Amino acid sequence: MLQVPSAAPRSRSDGLSIFPIFRSLHNGELESVAKRCIQRRYRRNEWLVELHEINSDVFFVQSGVLRLQLPKAADREVVFKDYQARDFFGAVSVIHGKPRKVGVLALTDVTVTRMPGEVFRELLHAHRDICDQFLLRMAAEIQHLVNRVNEFSTLDVRHHIYAELLRLSRPKPGTEHGAVISPPPRQVDIAARIGTRREPVAREMKALERAGLLKRNRGALEIADTVRLQSLLEKVEPLV
């Protein structure tokens, strides 16, 4: 009987090798780091991080989708950001050592690698490329927050919705200015992202559909012309 060779066991470093921040590490270094980490699986709707939790782990997302948010209060949620495979989060808590200000919820079944904060700090201090990439990421996060604060300060709800749709979208292949949002966000999720209620989101999205700028397809929202939608944002009069 023909013997089929068994597959080689996966290296523990495989889970970290997909993250660009570790591009400067060779396999032996990755293997050493991976031995100091823990891989965890979480079920859909399970909290990975609770509000005000104290821990210093950095979470590297292997698969699934997570959401950075405040727990639901009354009839409104506050959503900050979603994370997917190849993203990581938690490094800010490693730096300041204070309790987590928001929670992280699994939107799907997820697998993450949890790296102790002291290991992450060692990597930052020992590898210039990792440190530089982390600083660039933090600079991008700060710019993102500045943009969000500017939107909250200067845009009304209608134009805030336009900005959020553009932010969530990705270019549609084969089109010049088309874009898609997939999976399509629920209206309540968009409302949570911009600090409003579902009703105005439903109203404005319906208006965009009537204008031919937004189209619902199975598994996605399509923006027909991102340049046109962006022009509507640029013409708005600031609130202040």
Image (cartoon, grey):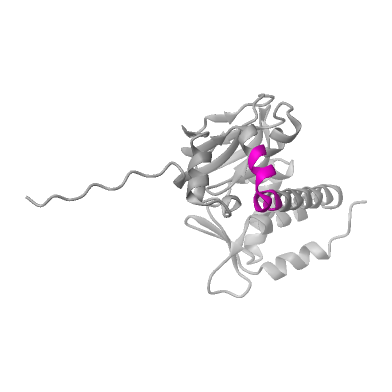
Q: Which residues are magenta?
A: 121-133
x and y, in percent, of residue 92 in the image: 71, 37
The image shows residue 182, relative to residue 74, as above or below, that is below
Question: As rendered, which of 26 and 76 lies closer to the eye?
Answer: 26
The image shows residue 225, relative to residue 238, as above or below, that is below
Question: As rendered, which of 203 and 124 lies closer to the eye?
Answer: 124
Residue at image x 67%, y 30%?
Answer: 75
Residue at image x 66%, y 53%?
Answer: 129
Residue 122 colored in magenta in the image? yes
x and y, in percent, of residue 2 in the image: 10, 52
Identify the residue at the far right of this view.
240
Residue at image x 51%, y 38%?
Answer: 112
In the image, is 48 to the left or to the right of 201?
left
Q: Is residue 64 visible?
A: no
In the image, is 69 to the left or to the right of 153?
left
x and y, in percent, of residue 35 in the image: 48, 35
